[in-house]
Image (cartoon, rainbow, N blue to C red):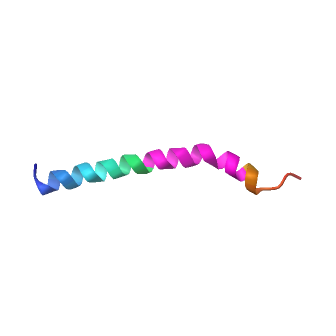
Amino acid sequence: MSPEETLEIFALLQAAELSRAKQGAMVRLPELGSQVTPDR
């Protein structure tokens, strides 16, 4: 496997990790927001 291929795979893995983290944050955001903002 060439270094270019290794880098490409690494980049793909990082992108996947990032989008998964972003999705997790999206899901978590509402409950975090409700904890932060006091009820009026």
| Figure disc tally | 0
> Residue 15's x, y, as percent?
36, 50
Q: Residue at x 50, y 49 (%)?
A: 22
Q: Is residue 23 magenta?
A: yes
> Residue 16's x, y, as percent?
38, 46
Left or right, 24 with respect to 15, comes to right
Find the residue positioned furthest to the front. 35
Q: Residue at x 27, y 52 (%)?
A: 10
Q: Residue at x 30, y 48 (%)?
A: 12
> Residue 34's x, y, as percent?
75, 49
Find the residue positioned furthest to the left. 2
Majority secondary structure in the magenta region: helix
Left or right, 25 with respect to 8, comes to right
> Residue 29's x, y, as percent?
64, 49
Left or right, 38 with respect to 26, comes to right
- Which contiguous range is marked in magenta? 19-33
Q: Residue at x 45, y 45 (%)?
A: 20
Q: Is residue 16 magenta?
A: no
